[in-house]
Amino acid sequence: KFYGQAVGYGDAEARQIAICKTLTIEQQISLLDKGNTVVLGRYDQDPNLEGKELLEWIIVEKNGNKAMLVSKYAIEASVFSIKPTTWSKSELRAWLNSDISSGFIGQVFYKSERNSILRNSTVTVYRDANGAEQVDICEDRVFLLSDNEANKYFNDNDSRCAVATEFLKTRNTNAFFSDNSMARYWLRSTT
């Protein structure tokens, strides 16, 4: 439980991750606090290796045995939508929440893990073409943060970026900052 809080130990986080690999997500969340890393699901993160690697998630909010997780690394780049739209109607939302084998949930999580991913009401405030404030509400299991949530969970612009995986770096994308290692988070807020 305390590896993630150990200061001055270079391998503390690696040891915590090793222990997390042996636990269910429910056990990890019950043992760890906000700011710690848990493992859940698998996704290709290294183009030089066969198979998928475990995904690491940061606990950004915890309430009892429930937690909101944000991917520790930028693992994929995708368009929000082909045409201007809201989060609830975007192709990215449909892909992220799809259980079929080509969807994110279907590719990343074992069936037993999917049951641990709770539905959440996402509320997104945006401005329409006339500048009027609108509210977009939908139910998601996987979602992008809104701009308000990004500001709530991350202290500054540097912490609102994620290190890109080696796999993502090989993709032809403009998601990176100039050093080709830090990626911008997509947000579900369209303005």
Image: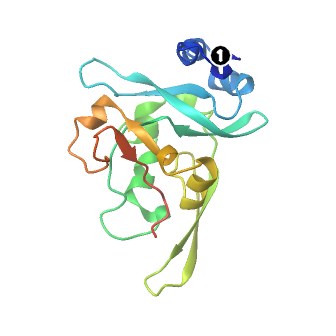
Q: Position of residue 149 (x, y in %)?
A: 60, 55
Q: Position of residue 158 (x, y in %)?
A: 47, 46
Question: Which residue is most to the right?
Answer: 64
Quick one: quadrant of the N terminus? top right
Q: Which residue is mark 1?
A: 3
Q: Nearer the viewer, residue 116 or 50?
A: 50
Q: Nearer the viewer, residue 126 or 180?
A: 180
Residue at the spot 35% in from the left edge and 32% down from the top edge: 165
Report the colour scheme. Answer: rainbow
Query: Could you tell whether 173 is left or right of 129 in the image?
Result: left
Q: Is residue 160 depicted above or below 111 in this figure?
A: below
- Picture quadrant where residue 43 is located: top left
Q: Circle 1: is it few (<14), some (14-19), or many (20+) Cα within 10 Å?
A: some
Q: Nearer the viewer, residue 121 or 149?
A: 149
- Picture quadrant where residue 108 is located: top left
Residue 21 seen in the current view:
yes
- Type of the residue with mark 1: Tyr
Residue at the spot 64% in from the left edge and 19% down from the top edge: 7
Query: Could you tell whether 120 is left or right of 79 in the image?
Result: right
Q: Nearer the viewer, residue 62 or 142?
A: 62
Q: Is residue 177 depicted above or below 124 in this figure?
A: above
Q: Position of residue 140 (x, y in %)?
A: 56, 51
Residue at the spot 70% in from the left edge and 25% down from the top edge: 32
Q: Position of residue 104 (x, y in %)?
A: 42, 40
Query: Could you tell whether 79 is left or right of 97 in the image?
Result: left
Residue at the spot 59% in from the left edge and 48% down from the top edge: 155
Question: Which residue is most to the bottom?
Answer: 130
Query: Could you tell whether 160 is left or right of 84 in the image?
Result: right
Residue 97 seen in the current view:
no
Determine whether the residue tagged by mark 1 lies in a helix, strand or loop.
helix
Q: Is residue 10 depicted above or below 158 in this figure?
A: above
